[in-house]
Structures are given as C-alpha cells and as structure tokens.
Image (spheres, rainbow, N blue to C red):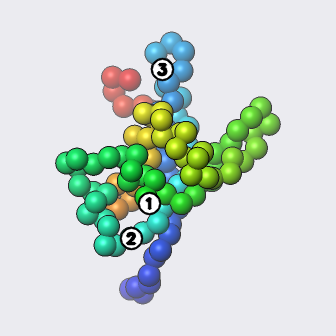
Amino acid sequence: MHLEEVNEYWWPVTVRWPVDGGKFQLRRFEALWRYEPEAIGDALSVADRDDREIVERFMVGWRGVTIGADRKEAPFTLDALQRQLKLPYVRDALARSLIESLSGIEPKNSETPPAGS
C-alpha cells in the first residue's frame, strides 16, 4: 500500500430538495473538502457540533452546482456557500457528506428516498 498525504479531496453530496406534493427531489454535486488531520475530532464530534461552522471550515470548493435557466456552473465563494447553508436541507447534506468521508462510510447512491419521506 502506498501512503500519500491528502490535503483536499472531492466527495459526493446528495441533497433531498423539497418539491410540491410533499415529495423530495434528489440533487447531487461534489464538495471539495480540506483534510486537516488535527481537526478531524471537531468534525466528528456529535455533541455541540455546529454544522454551519464545520462546513465553512472544511469546504473549499464545489462542482456540479449550477445557477440560472441556462444552468451555468456556479462559482464557489464563501458568500455563495453561506447563502446555501441557510437552507437546512443543504446544510445537513453537506455536513453528512463531510462526516461520511471522514468516517470511512461509503456514499449512498440510492435513487429512492428513505422510508417516511
């Protein structure tokens, strides 16, 4: 096994976006996370975790996020991230993506929303 230092990595994010009729639409993109070994405990600690703060600390980019009718790629900026973090379903999806990546949990690729949705 070859060991290498990883400073940043791409990881999938799936947002369960609410739509009319009490349903959800799955929206996917990728987040670029900064890997800080000394700070992993902060991200994985469930008690007193502030998801917004954790995401802002570790997220350094995205791809597959589009805006407008022509679906142009949305540039990643701290301001754009902070606007998206106001949406609880986006904030939860980003925090889940980071925690899964640090925990060694394989990302879910299911098209079917969990029961009860």
Which residue carries the number 3 mark?
A: 23
Q: Nearer the viewer, mark 2 or mark 3?
A: 2
Which residue is rendered at x = 76% and y = 44% of the image? 72
Which residue is rendered at x = 60% and y = 45% of the image? 80
Mark 2 neighbour class, 10 Å CA radius: few under 14, some 14 to 19, many 20 or more? few
The residue positioned farthest toward the front in the image shown: 79
The image quadrant that residue 115 belongs to is top left
Q: Nearer the viewer, mark 3 or mark 1?
A: 1
Relative image position of residue 24 (x, y in whole percent) = 49, 25
Which residue is rendered at x = 32% and y = 67% of the image? 39
Relative image position of residue 107 (x, y in whole percent) = 42, 52
| In contact (CB < 8 Å): disc 3 and disc 1 | no
- For residue 50, say whether it is visible: yes
Which quadrant would the N terminus be assigned to in this image? bottom left
Q: Earlier in the sequence, mark 1 or mark 2?
A: 2
Which residue carries the number 2 mark?
A: 36
